[in-house]
């Protein structure tokens, strides 16, 4: 009889008629294993939560600084973009004619298309045909041409460091043709719209 069994026998003797349940070595080992498993699970859970927090924080930073996600409101960019579309913009610089960009205006975010850049001459005739530096633009994204609201003197030269923007729905869009909005400086541009993620049936690149 070993020392552990002697201790159990002594406890039984001291207990008299009462039965004292003394855990066996196997029970102790099983309980210890269970506690070790719980501790391992808690450590794994903490590590997973910390990893998710870090991934979420990095995703938010990327979304804010590099790939902003925006929702289109209004109809100034139909038929290219519809009200309610969700798009991704790429932050950058050096936007060119034809690019669709998002920009800040009066604490709002607007989306329009780049028509001309710094130093270019823009002219629009009564039929809504747009010329840049004397060359007529090919605009397959326009479903119906129109002069729209225009109170600037044409032909118009784009100021340095700015972009002349117009919506694709020329009849109703308020854009650089209106002196109240005018041309947009580069530092007001959030980024170029590159991808539509909603609705899913229209998922794909935007041009």
Image (cartoon, grey):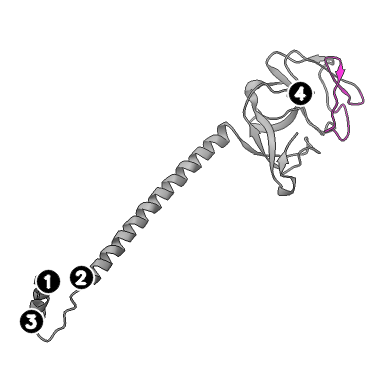
Mark positioned earlier in the residue sequence (1 or 3): 1
- The residue to which callout 1 is attached is 4
User: Circle 3 sits on which residue?
Assistant: 13
**Which is more N-terminal, label 4 or label 1?**
1
Q: Do the residues labelled 2 and 3 touch (CB within 8 Å)?
A: no
Q: Is the magenta stretch mostly helix, strand or loop?
A: loop
Mark 1 or mark 4, whichever is nearer to me: 1
**Numbered range of the magenta stretch:** 126-148
Residue 203 % position (x, y) = 71, 44
Q: Mark 2: which secondary structure? A: helix
Would you name the residue on which mark 2 appears?
Answer: 25
What whole-number distance in Å separates the C-alpha atoms at marks 1 and 4?
A: 88 Å
Look at mark 4 in the image and give the residue it sits on. 97
**Do residues under tags 1 and 2 come within 8 Å of each other at their CB atoms?**
yes
Which of the image's four quarters has the C terminus?
A: top right
> Which label sits in the foreground, 1 or 3?
1
Left or right for 69, reference 174: left
Please tell me whether residue 137 belongs to the stretch shown in magenta: yes
Q: Residue 93, relative to residue 34: is it above or below? A: above
**How many angstroms separate mark 1 from mark 2 (CA)?**
9 Å
Residue 47 x/y as whole percent? 39, 48
Residue 193 disc label? none
The CA distance from mark 2 to mark 3 is: 20 Å
Would you say 57 lies left or right of 156 here? left
Q: Are dots 4 and 2 in contact, CB under 8 Å?
A: no
Identify the element where label 4 is drawn: loop
């Amino acid at each position: 009889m070993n020392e552990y069994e002697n201790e159990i026998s002594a406890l039984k003797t001291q207990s008299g008629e009462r039965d004292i349940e003394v855990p066996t070595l196997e029970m102790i080992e099983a309980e210890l294993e269970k506690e070790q498993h719980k501790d391992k699970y808690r450590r794994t859970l903490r590590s997973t939560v910390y990893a998710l927090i870090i991934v979420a924080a990095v995703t938010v930073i990327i979304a804010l600084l590099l790939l902003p996600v925006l929702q289109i409101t209004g109809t100034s960019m139909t038929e290219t973009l519809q009200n309610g579309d969700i798009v991704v913009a790429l932050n950058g610089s050096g936007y060119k004619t034809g690019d669709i960009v998002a920009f800040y205006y009066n604490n709002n975010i607007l989306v329009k298309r780049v028509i001309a850049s710094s130093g270019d001459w823009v002219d629009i005739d009564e039929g809504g045909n747009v010329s840049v530096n004397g060359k007529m633009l090919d605009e397959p994204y326009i479903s119906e041409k129109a002069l729209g609201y225009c109170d600037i003197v044409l032909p118009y030269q784009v100021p340095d460091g700015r972009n002349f923007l117009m919506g694709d729905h020329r009849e109703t869009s308020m854009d650089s043709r209106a002196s109240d909005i005018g041309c947009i400086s580069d530092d007001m541009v959030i980024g170029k719209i590159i991808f539509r993620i909603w609705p899913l049936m229209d998922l794909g690149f935007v041009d």
